[in-house]
Amino acid sequence: MSVEAQPSQQESKAGARKDGDAVGGALQERQKWMSVLAKANSKMLANKVAGLKGLPNYAVIRPAESGSVMVRGRAGGTGSPFNLGEMSVTRCVVQLNGSDKGAVIGHAYVTGRDKHHAESAALLDALLQTAHWRPIIQEAIIAPLAQAAESERRTRREKVAATKVNFFTMVRGED
Amino acid sequence: MESALRSGALQDANALCRPFVDPIGDSSRMFRAFLTAMSQPGRVVAAFGPGEFPETLGTTGFGAALTLLDTDTPVYLSKKVGDAGTRANLRFHCGCPIVDDPAEAAFALLTLAEAETVLPKLPVGTPDYPDKSATALILVDGFTSDDTVRLTGPGIYKYKTLGLDAPRGLWKLLRENSDRYPLGFDTVFVGDGDIVGLPRSTRIDPVNIVEEI
């Protein structure tokens, strides 16, 4: 299987432009939690899902499958695009049935080949779209995971900053 | 955590259906069925589809769509077939572009009642590229044991009869289609659990109709 560059993300971007700020805000929120879920540790995520009580039934619409996507970059962020290389991606789609909004569809694209990670993330994405589960999951899962990721980033930044070396060139005084 | 088993057409129109349980094996078996149907025109070939399906397509129609459609095949959906749920399912599972103009389609999904209005609009290819034509998937209730038409042509030993309760105008249209061979569209009748192929190379003659159609 080869995955084309994440159509869901492109669609949501187009949607944000079209539908104005209110919808754009909801989309941004969803992008945020999808990002947190995709970057989370798989085992930690599975434990958190197991901790949720009374989960509704869900159907796996697209069973987790792994493939590769081409990562493209631009030199300096502005140059012409080049293909950096392929990376493994696993995607999954689940659907909650009989919730307050009818059929709710949760998507997940995660890096690597961990199918359980993709399925947990897709399920949580679906649940986060329902009024009942959103506050529960935001508080129990998204907030702690986002916090953990942020503190890890900070530690890393501090470690790097502590070893910062300034290079300078001696003026040779030839002028 | 797996959901309870459900089957049949979905209640919620916007819901997505679960596709083939074994995507590679099932679609290969379905593709084999299509190969048999197209190489032996008029033969009723067993076919199948997933347990969940959009109501307008039926299980075999959905199975056919999952097998044949992808991002490279623009699809035309007739009025009776193309409701919101069917469109959503095809777009999600097949990723196929859905076109409003039958002339741009590589595949057309339609009911038997709509065949006479849709088929004449399908592309028939050009003399240089007769393959740039469409394949019509016509959804029918089923095939009968009467002999409605007599088929002759490649893939048929002597002749073969086919029983299908279709308007006479449709047979006339399909006959005219075979007259312009190698141009023309190909047809597959999709029943409930079986399919019949009718490529453009097959000659159609009436059985019980005395006057020329």
Image (cartoon, coloured by chain):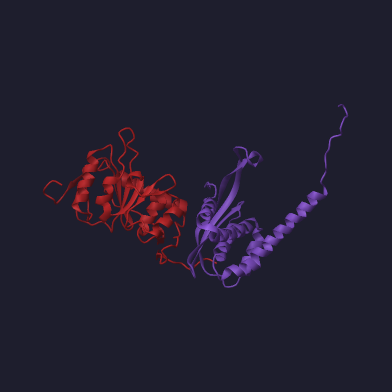
Chain colours: A purple, B red
Give the image location of residue A133, x and y in percent. 57, 69
Q: Residue furthest left?
A: B210
| Residue at the (50%, 57%) spot, across then down | A19
Q: Is residue B29 left or right of residue A64?
A: left
- Quarter of the view holding residue B50: bottom left
Give the image location of residue B30, x and y in percent. 39, 51
Q: Residue furthest right?
A: A173
Q: Is residue B94 left or right of residue A131?
A: left
Let me know if residue B41 appears in the view. Answer: no
Give the image location of residue A96, x and y in percent. 50, 65
Seen in the picture, residue B131 relative to B197 is either above or below; the reply is above
| Residue at the (61%, 46%) spot, across then down | A87
Q: Residue furthest bottom?
A: A54
Relative depth, front residue between A96 and A36: A36
Q: Is residue A150 left or right of residue B177?
A: right
Q: Is residue B140 left or right of residue A8?
A: left
Give the image location of residue A112, x and y in percent. 62, 51
| Residue at the (46%, 51%) spot, across then down | B24
Relative depth, front residue between B68 and A168: A168
Relative depth, front residue between A74 and A156: A74
Number of marks in the image?
0
> Which quarter of the rendering shows the N terminus of chain B?
bottom right
Let me know if residue A142 appears in the view. Answer: yes
